[in-house]
Image (cartoon, rainbow, N blue to C red):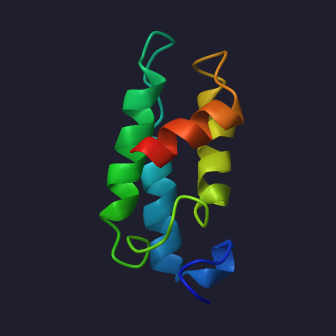
């Protein structure tokens, strides 16, 4: 798969999928008053630290971001997926 394409979990090894899941969990906001932008920056930083993931664009990592967002809105209400995509792309 090219670095510009859309990713699916099968594009990565089992170990990398575990690292991605850990990054998503670790970057979730800890409280409702947590700055969502800060959490997204943390997610981007953690993903870039994973060698197999580091070179992919934010667009290619859209499925990862969507999974993070689904969990984050349970903690911080009012953040749309579009807001999350925008902030993630700024990270």
Q: Is residue 87 above or below residue 78?
A: below
Residue at far bottom of view: 1
Residue toward you, 43 or 80:
80
- Give residue 80's position: percent from left, percent from top: 70, 28
Name the quadrant containing residue 72: top right
Whether residue 26 is visible to the viewer of this picture, yes or no, is no
Residue toward you, 44 or 28:
44
Residue drawn at the location 48% of the way across and 71% of the way down: 56
Residue at far top of view: 33
- Give residue 81's position: percent from left, percent from top: 69, 36
Whether residue 23 is visible to the viewer of this picture, yes or no, is yes
Q: Is residue 51 above or below residue 89?
A: below
Q: Is residue 73 above or below residue 87?
A: above
Residue drawn at the location 53% of the way across and 81% of the way down: 3
Looking at the image, residue 56 sits to the left or right of residue 73; the answer is left
- Give residue 91's position: percent from left, percent from top: 39, 45
Residue drawn at the location 52% of the way across and 57% of the way down: 21
- Give residue 65's position: percent from left, percent from top: 60, 49
Question: In which quadrant of the rendered image does the N terminus lie?
Answer: bottom right
Residue toward you, 25 or 61:
61
Residue drawn at the location 65% of the way across and 26% of the way down: 73
């Amino acid at each position: 798969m090219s670095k510009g394409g859309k990713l699916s979990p099968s594009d990565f090894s089992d170990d990398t999928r575990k690292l991605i899941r850990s990054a998503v969990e670790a970057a979730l906001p800890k409280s409702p008053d947590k700055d969502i932008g800060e959490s997204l920056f943390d997610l981007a930083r953690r993903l870039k630290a994973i060698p197999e993931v580091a070179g992919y664009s934010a667009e290619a990592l859209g499925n990862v971001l969507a999974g993070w967002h689904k969990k984050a809105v349970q903690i911080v209400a009012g953040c749309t997926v579009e807001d999350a995509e925008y902030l993630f792309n700024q990270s």
